Image: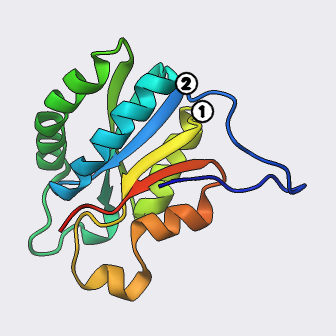
Amino acid sequence: MLLWHPAPDGSSSVPASLDAVVVALDQSMEALSILDPLESLGTAAGVKSYTLVHVAESRGAGKAGWSPLSAVQARANERAAPIRERLSAGGAEVSLQLVVAEDPSDGIIGIAHENGASLIAMTTHGMTGVRPTLVGSVGAQVLRKWEGALLIQRPKA
């Protein structure tokens, strides 16, 4: 689903171009399902750059099961290689950014602002568990907070 918020005056806020796109990923396979619609949209819109974003939540630091940042970075780099290859096939630049944030939605949106992105692409359900039930999904939070266009997909079961 491609969504965008109306401008404050009620007019359309559809971006004139999709030069820069932020792709929110986590360590789940479900998060990768956004690549099919994104690749089609990116080719049609002539996207020039993709920033793959992985957010490491700072609130887990020091707790059992928490991975050191270097381990998260290594996994993110490893998983990004085939994604980079796929998205750069059309000539777009692809970079990876790891951000540490207490709230993943704030980390994703912060990188989108930093990179001048006109679109954030993500799945509605990546990593799961009790947390989404308690605070709402990251996708729902990005939708509420992000003023730009959002390409969002629920992965197939």
Q: Quadrant of the C terminus?
A: bottom left
What residue is shown with label 2? 19
Residue 102 x/y as whole percent:
40, 66
For residue 127, side relative to residue 100 (left or right): left
For residue 121, side relative to residue 27 (left or right): right
Vertical placement of 82 versus 102: above or below?
A: above
Residue 97 x/y as whole percent:
34, 37
Number of labelled discs? Answer: 2
Of the residues shown, which amino acid type is indicated by label 1? Answer: Gly
Q: Residue at x 60, y 63 (%)?
A: 145
Vertical placement of 124 versus 107: above or below?
A: below
For residue 137, side relative to residue 119 (left or right): left
Vertical placement of 150 versus 81: above or below?
A: below
Badge 1: residue crowd in 10 Å (few <14, some 14–19, many ≥20) = few
Near-viewer residue (14 or 8): 14
Q: Residue at x 38, y 52 (%)?
A: 122
Tell me if label 1 and label 2 are in contact, CB under 8 Å. Answer: yes
Vertical placement of 26 versus 48: above or below?
A: below
In front: label 1 or label 2: 2
Q: Residue at x 14, y 29 (%)?
A: 82
The Cα–Cα distance between marks 1 and 2, rounded to whole angstroms, is 9 Å
Near-viewer residue (3 or 122): 3
Residue 12 x/y as whole percent:
78, 47
For residue 86, side relative to residue 140 (left or right): left
Q: Tell me, what colour scheme is on the image?
A: rainbow
Q: Secondary structure at mark 2?
A: loop
Badge 2: residue crowd in 10 Å (few <14, some 14–19, many ≥20) = some
Residue 2 x/y as whole percent:
52, 51
What residue is shown with label 1? 116
Q: Residue at x 66, y 53 (%)?
A: 147
Mark toward the start of the polypeptide (1 vs 2): 2
Of the residues shown, which amino acid type is indicated by label 2? Answer: Asp
